[in-house]
Amino acid sequence: MRIQHTRVSVRVPATSANIGPGFDTLGLALQLCDDLELEATTGGVEILAQGEGSGSVPTGEEHLVVRALRRGLDHAGAPQSGIRLHTVNRIPHGGGLGSSAAATVAGLLLARGLLSDPEALDDQSVLHLAAEFEGHPDNAAPALLGGVVLSWMNAGQARAVPLAHAAGVVNPLVLLPTATLSTHQARGLLPESVPHGDAVFNASRAALLVHALTGVPELLMEATEDRLHQEQRASGMPQSVELMRVLRQEGHPAVISGAGPSVLVLSGDRAEIAPLVRRIVADPTGWRIAQVPLRETGSAPVVG
C-alpha cells in the first residue's frame, strides 16, 4: 500500500451516546463538527489547533488524531509520513459529546484519504479501530455513519447499523455546563454489578427507545428511562443529574449525554427550557443552551 494523496480534509460531528437506557449501545450524531485538514510532509509533526481545547491538547505524536492516523496507516500497510495538521475544534472537550471519538474517527479517515486504495481502511475497519481506542463503539459509530446508530461488539469486532428514525422525532437541545468530567472518572462511579431487575428494566426501555425513535414520539419519555448509569453518576455531576430530573418531571425527554456532564433533551424548545435551567441551576451563566440539529450524513475524507 502506498500514500497517493498529500492533502486531505474531513469534517466529523459531535455525538451523544447512551440516550438514557442504551448504555454503550445507542448514539446519535449532532450538527456540531470539528474540521481537520492534513498535509503529508517529509518532516515531523506540526499541529495548529484552534477552538475548543486548543490550549490543552498535545502538539506532537501524542495528539489523538495523530495516534489514530498512525494506527490507520499501519492497519493498511502504508508507510508513515510527516504531518502538518490544522484543526478547528467546535466539540467541547470533557462534556459528554464524543470529542475523543470524533478525533479518533477523524484521524482514521484522514489516513484513508492518503491511501492509494481507500478500501484498505473501509468503514468497518475504521469502526473497529476506533472501538479499540474508545473501548466501545457507541460514539464512534454515529461519528462515522451519522444519524441515530445502534452498535455492539461481536467476538471482539465492533458492529453498527443506522436506525431509520422518523423525521422530526428527534430535535435535540444540548445543555452544556462549563464544568467537565472525563469518561474515565465517570466510569469509575459505576458499580461493578447491577440488580437483575434493573438490567431487565433497561433492556425493555432500550428496545422501546428503538421503537419510539422510528415514529412514536409520545413514547420517548418512557423509552428514555434508565436505572444503570445516570443516577449512579450523580456525585460527579450533581447539577446535571438534578437538571435532568426536573426536566423529566416537567415532561421533557432529557438524558445525560454520554458520560456527562452535558444534558441532552431529545425533543425540546430552547425558549421553553431556558427558564427552567435558570430556575434549577445555581449559576445559569455557567451553562450554554443550544438547539443542535441531528446530523444525518456520515463522515468521509475529501482529497485535495
Image (cartoon, rainbow, N blue to C red):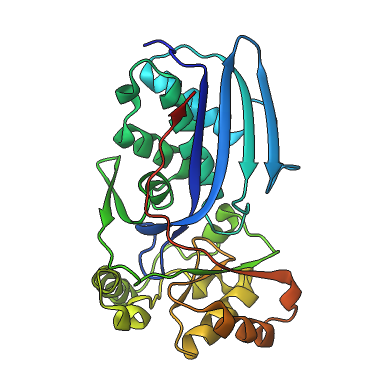
Q: Is residue 205 above or below residue 121?
A: below
- Residue 270 occupies quadrant: bottom right
Q: Residue at x 43, y 72 (%)?
A: 266
Farthest residue, direction front: 304
Residue 72, horizontal then vertical, whole percent: 43, 26
Horizontal side of residue 158 vs 48, given as left or right: left
Q: Is residue 70 above or below residue 128?
A: above
Residue 128 at least partly seen? yes
Q: Is residue 54 above or below residue 152?
A: above
- Residue 239 occupies quadrant: bottom right
- For the N terminus, the quadrant is top left
Q: Residue at x 32, y 22 (%)?
A: 120
Residue 12, horizontal then vertical, whole percent: 49, 44
Q: Residue at x 62, y 54 (%)?
A: 92
Q: Residue at x 52, y 84 (%)?
A: 247
Horizontal side of residue 243 vs 50, given as left or right: left
Residue 58 at least partly seen? no
Residue 166, horizontal then vertical, whole percent: 28, 68
Which sits in the foreground, 191 or 69? 69
Residue 51, horizontal then vertical, whole percent: 69, 46
* Count of numbered marks: 0
